[in-house]
Image (cartoon, helix red, strand yellow):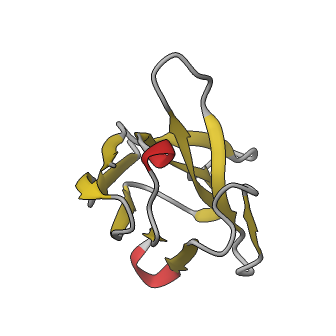
Amino acid sequence: QVQLVESGGGLVQAGGSLRLSCAASGSIVSINTMGWYRQAPGKQRELVAVITSGDTTNYADSVKGRFTISRDNAKNTVYLEMNSLKPEDTAVYYCNAVLRLPFVVRARDYWGQGTQVTVSS
């Protein structure tokens, strides 16, 4: 069984910083893309940032220049460094990993439970 466990959310003032972490555990053969998504109240879940196994990154336009995604393959962990936070960044942030399990040919998506980020003005 695979688990994605997030940490690092919380309450911060506008202009502040937070660092999110997400560790994948279980019987994992390989991890392809890892990423962060967020969902604000009344809105759809949206992509924040993704990083491939080759460290190629992609960001939502709204966070470019403020957020940085990185990963530690040895620890099966992905990070999201968030700087210059704005009230509109307030949301539940979800970790995502596309990974392969033993004896399963196709990779599939796994999600964390979500961590709340609240930015006060």
Displayed quadrant of residue 33: bottom right
Residue 94 visible, this orientation: no
Residue at point 28%, 58% (across, down)? 13
Residue lying furthest left: 11
Residue at point 74%, 47% (across, down)? 105
- The foreground one among 63 and 120 is 120
Residue at point 37%, 54% (across, down)? 26
Compared with 61, 114 (above or below) is above
Q: Is residue 44 found left or right of 72 in the rendered image?
A: right
> If the image is split into quadrants, where does the N terminus sit?
top left
Residue 35 visible, this orientation: yes
Q: Is residue 75 found left or right of 8 in the rendered image?
A: right
- The foreground one among 110 and 102 is 110
- Residue 99: % across, % down: 61, 54
- Residue 45: % across, % down: 60, 30
- Residue 10: % across, % down: 23, 52
Compared with 120, 69 (above or below) is below
- Residue 70: % across, % down: 55, 78
Compared with 66, 74 (above or below) is below
Residue at point 39%, 77% (across, down)? 75
The number of numbered discs placed on residues in the rendered structure image is 0
Residue lying furthest top: 42
Residue lying furthest front: 121
